[in-house]
Image (tube, coloured by chain):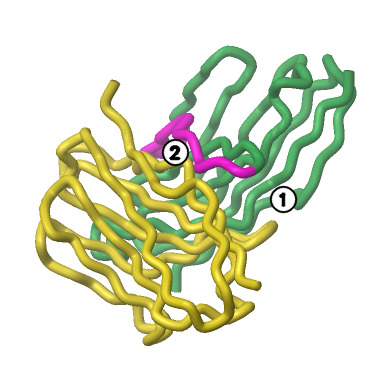
Amino acid sequence: DAMVIQNPRYQVTQFGKPVTLSCSQTLNHNVMYWYQQKSSQAPKLLFHYYDKDFNNEADTPDNFQSRRPNTSFCFLDIRSPGLGDAAMYLCATRAFPAHNEQFFGPGTRLTVL
Amino acid sequence: EDQVTQSPEALRLQEGESSSLNCSYTVSGLRGLFWYRQDPGKGPEFLFTLYSAGEEKEKERLKATLTKKESFLHITAPKPEDSATYLCAVQAESGGSYIPTFGRGTSLIVHP
């Protein structure tokens, strides 16, 4: 089945230790998104790609970076995680303009010790 | 600025007790309103897209409706497995055409 896959599902890191989260999709969607979601809050958009065009949200901290080496894969790098970066990180895709809805992966739960 | 407000924040129902969740929005030019279901520790799962006032969509015990200012997600005779957080999002013409604005969600618990 076509889907959005995120690895790892759970990531534990130490304060200041870099971490990379990955997302892959078999949907061949041209738009990919990275969201941060904390408990009882709306997903907060960090980055999105329209094909290879990278878009950084204005309030995304410099500590966060992203790469999309090809259509299928996208990575989220957190260079120096702080306690406030503990959250669920969601990857989503969309076929624009054919479809309006987003398809989400299962998420990666990041814990910072 | 586009805004999405969901109410209530949390809702507890008894099995079989029908109710509605609300999503009110302020956008300049609505391209679409989306409902998602999110189970604890998982990513949101797409439920419905509504495009214009008066539109309705149904799926099992769920029915979504849309007016010019708000959307309702009606849950008829809910079961415990309907327990989840329900997220509403809107796609506005001003949002780069592919950046939706999400609400904070309504956490629904259905007791057996």
Kind of residue sitting beneath label 2: Ala
In percent of width and height, residue B62 lies at: 60, 22
Total marks placed: 2
In which quadrant of the rendered view does residue B87 lie?
Answer: top right
Q: Which residue is mark 2?
A: B53
The residue that appears at 32% across and 50% down in the rendered structure is: A23
Kind of residue sitting beneath label 1: Ser
Instruction: Tell which circle, 2 or 1, labels the residue nearer the N-terminal end.
Output: 1
Image check: A30 left or right of A89?
left
> Looking at the image, which is closer to me, A85 or A56?
A85
In percent of width and height, residue A72 lies at: 17, 45
Answer yes or no: is residue B85 visible: yes
In percent of width and height, residue B45 lies at: 48, 34
Q: Colour of chain A?
A: yellow
In percent of width and height, residue A75 lies at: 29, 61
- Separation of residues labelled 2 and 1 (CA atoms): 20 Å
For the record, the magenta segment spans B41-53
Q: Colour of chain B?
A: green
Q: Residue furthest bottom?
A: A62
Residue B105 lies, with reference to residue A61, above or below; the image says above
Image check: B67 left or right of A112?
left
Nearer to us: label 2 or label 1 = 1
The residue that appears at 37% across and 65% down in the rendered structure is: A20
Q: Which residue is mark 1?
A: B7
Image check: B12 left or right of B1?
right
- Tell whether label 1 touches label 2 (CB within 8 Å): no
- The disc numbered 1 marks a residue on which chain? B
User: Quick check: is A81 in the magenta stretch?
Assistant: no
